[in-house]
Image: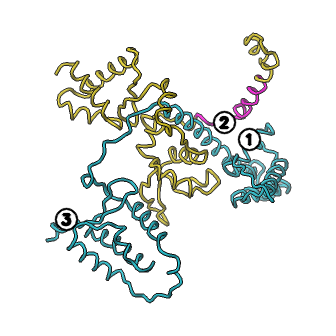
Chain colours: A cyan, B yellow
Amino acid sequence: MSYKVKLDVFEGPLDLLLYLIKKNEIDIYDIPIATITEQYLEYLELMRMLDLNIAGEFLVIAATLIHIKSKMLLPPDEKELLPEEEEDPREELVRRLVEYKKFKEVAGILQDLEGQRKKMFTRDIPFEVEPGEVFFEASLFDLITAFTRVLKDVPKEMFQEIIKDEFTVEQKVHDLLHMLVVTPAISLFELFKNSKNKTEIIAMFLAVLELIRLKEIIVVQKKNFSDIEIVRNEKHRLNTE
Amino acid sequence: MEKVQIKNIIEAMLFVSDKPLFLSEIKSVLEGPDADEIKEVIAELVGEFETQGRPLRIKEIAGGYQIVTDPVFAPWLKKLYKTAGSDRLSGPGLETLAIIAYKQPATKPEIEAIRGVNVDGVLKTLIEKNLVKIMGRRETVGRPIIYGTTQEFLQYFGLNSLQELPKLEEFNFTEKDIELPEHLQKEEEEFKQQEGGNPDVQADGAS
């Protein structure tokens, strides 16, 4: 039996470094690289022991620390650079740490503001929208969200079929325009419901995007995450006629 | 129109509105008084709310005016709306928002460079919460998507404008600043040791 412990104290490698600097009461502008590198690696080891997934970002900073450490061990190249031009190998890391620390403080301020704001209540129950009355234009994001939702609902077994290229975007554009002649508004989810497989859904989705691009149709939504309706872009049609 | 009536109309509008009302909106409804007059009336109204022992306040949020409850009554209102106030933003969420708020329009790599971690998931959540929006693309190589904060961001934090955030330069640390928290810690320890002592003694001890 193994224990899995969640230790999400550190938001990232820089956060861990800041913690070590604070813990050791170190001046951020004069970091004893050897000590900090050692402690940093100890923490990574601890995280590994705790069965934590060590994100690649932690390793990047570990490599950076070791790189700086090795650079500082080497004697400065006297021939190439004048002493005053010699750059402290830690400089870049310190700059990043200071920058990160600033935003961490701001995050703290935001957190305070959030707390204060949560104590002030406002009227936030909008009047019930009359169905079919108010629409706002669905964004590309809403479309993609709807699309992924549809993909999720496709039965898994179908993935095993080898399907010929039987659905084309062109055909779907055609179909869609025909459908819109018969019915003024089509629900996006209904549209995908009859699709046989992923290819057809993708072809259909691309057809929808294509028609939006051509300004033939517009997509509207009653509220966030609700169904999306496809309607003819009357304005466009009038303009072109 | 009499001033009293203007005041009453404004209060009624603020009462009904579920979002901050802009001065321009109020002005176009009233069709008469100019912006300065309206501002003056609102200032009076703000004063009345505060001095007449009412549980409501008029706050300038996101560039508009909104009626909010006095924070004092939060405990009761939280009981009324059982879920309200429970979902706070996560640490990574706040950090990412902080970066976007100051660096906007910012690309994902720019945010990641500062935070040192991938921000895919956090960004998605912030966009879903409508605190961050895609502002378009930067016209450079790869045309990366750029992000910025929304009107909702200001509302969420009760800010009137982004200018209300502290200046980033105020966070410039000198070596002394870095040491300061430790001094305070020591002072605190000292203070704890001489518990019950005069607070003035602590100040002397620190010098």
Mark 2 on the same chain as mark 1: no
Q: Residue extending furthest left?
A: A241
Does B109 sit above or below residue B192? below
Does A135 sit above or below residue B20? below
Q: Which residues are magenta?
A: B170-187
Residue B173: give its label: 2
Judge from the rendering whether residue B20 lies leftward or rightward of residue B95; answer left or right. Answer: left
Secondary structure beneath dot 2 equals: loop
Secondary structure beneath dot 1 equals: loop
The CA distance from mark 2 to mark 1 is: 9 Å
Which chain is mark 2 on? Answer: B
Quarter of the picture containing the N terminus of chain A is bottom right
Tell me whether the residue at label 2 lies in contact with that at label 1, contact meaning CB atoms closer than 8 angstroms.
yes
The number of numbered badges drawn on the structure is 3
Judge from the rendering whether residue A121 lies leftward or rightward of residue A188; answer left or right. Answer: right
Secondary structure beneath dot 3 equals: helix
Residue at the spot of label 1: A28
Amino acid type, mark 2? Phe
- Residue B181 is a magenta residue: yes
The CA distance from mark 3 to mark 2 is: 59 Å
Q: Position of residue A144 (x, y in %)?
A: 43, 65
Which chain is mark 1 on? Answer: A
The CA distance from mark 3 to mark 1 is: 63 Å
Q: Closer to us: mark 3 or mark 2?
A: 3
- Residue A175 is a magenta residue: no
In this view, the residue in front, A203 or B153, is: A203
10 Å neighbourhood of mark 3: few (<14), some, or many (≥20)?
A: few
Q: Quadrant of residue A128?
A: top left
Residue that appears at 19% across and 65% down: A234
Amino acid type, mark 3? Glu
Residue at the spot of label 3: A234
